[in-house]
């Protein structure tokens, strides 16, 4: 599949997913898990929004919300960082990417960073905490979300008690990030 076509398919899929997550999260949770889970998610979302208005430990709230889906969020962050490296240094790998491929990667970069974490929370029957951040802090929420995301990745592995658990977590992280790169970007070098 050509890079442009792959980008169009990926972009339309990711935009649809993000639309549903941002504007219809409770309906999406109700569709996947049922109405009782939908009501629980709404109540939890209200309590998080209330806590965010009073509390200033934003990253703790962010980490708690991602306690069950941190590997998916971290994989999206790792994949987006690798994509940024491919864009900034296209000759860094043994494959050379064209300017068109790098431009397509650039268009998909923000979606690759945000969508996995959002979907991870939806699949854990939670309304994404990012929506609470946006509701309570407006445009400043983006900086807070970005900071907390990188902070969580850098201090990751808090709940891992043994070396084996840490190795398995990292293995899952690498496999998921590689899969995301393949599915979303197509990561295919040009033919010589």
Image (cartoon, grey):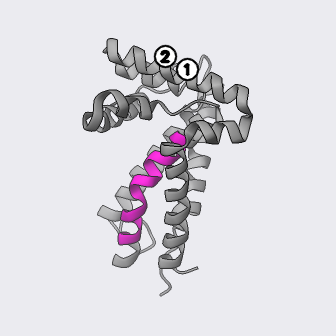
Question: Dot 2: few (<14), some (14–19), or many (≥20) neighbours within 10 Å?
Answer: few
Looking at the image, residue 108 sits to the left or right of residue 126; the answer is left
Image quadrant in which you'd find residue 92: bottom left
Q: Secondary structure at mark 1?
A: helix
Labels 2 and 1 touching (C-beta < 8 A): yes
Above or below, 180 against 26 in this view is below
Above or below, 100 against 173 in this view is below
Looking at the image, residue 8 sits to the left or right of residue 135; the answer is right
Seen at 70% across and 41% down, the residue is: 31
Magenta span? 102-118
Residue 155 coordinates in the image, percent (x, y): 42, 25
Residue 17 coordinates in the image, percent (x, y): 55, 52
Distance CA(mark 2)–CA(mark 1): 5 Å
| Residue at the bottom extreme, as displayed | 192
Seen at 47% across and 78% down, the residue is: 4
Front residue of this view, candidates 163 and 146:
146
Determine if the magenta segment contains residue 187. Answer: no
What secondary structure characterizes most of the magenta part? helix
Residue 87 coordinates in the image, percent (x, y): 34, 64
Determine if the magenta segment contains residue 110. Answer: yes
Tell how many labels. 2
Seen at 47% across and 53% down, the residue is: 112
Above or below, 179 against 39 in this view is below
Image quadrant in which you'd find residue 9: bottom right
Q: Is residue 110 visible?
A: yes
Q: Which residue is mark 1?
A: 44
In the drawing, what numbered circle is on residue 47?
A: 2
In the drawing, what numbered circle is on residue 138?
A: none
């Amino acid at each position: 599949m050509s890079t442009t076509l792959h980008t169009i398919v990926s972009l339309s899929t990711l935009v649809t997913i993000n639309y549903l997550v941002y504007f219809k999260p409770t309906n999406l949770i109700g569709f996947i898990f049922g109405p009782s889970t939908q009501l629980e998610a709404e109540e939890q979302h209200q309590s998080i929004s209330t806590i965010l208005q009073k509390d200033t430990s934003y990253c703790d709230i962010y980490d708690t919300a991602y306690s069950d889906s941190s590997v998916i969020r971290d994989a999206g962050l790792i994949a987006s960082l690798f994509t940024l490296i491919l864009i900034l240094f296209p000759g860094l790998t043994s494959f050379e990417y064209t300017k068109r491929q790098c431009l397509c990667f650039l268009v998909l970069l923000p979606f690759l960073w945000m969508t996995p974490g959002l979907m991870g929370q939806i699949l854990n029957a939670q309304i994404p905490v990012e929506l609470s951040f946006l509701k309570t802090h407006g445009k400043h929420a983006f900086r807070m979300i970005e900071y907390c995301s990188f902070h969580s990745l850098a201090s990751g592995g808090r709940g891992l008690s043994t070396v084996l658990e840490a190795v398995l977590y990292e293995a899952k992280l690498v496999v998921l990030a590689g899969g995301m790169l393949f599915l979303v970007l197509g990561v295919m070098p040009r033919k010589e």
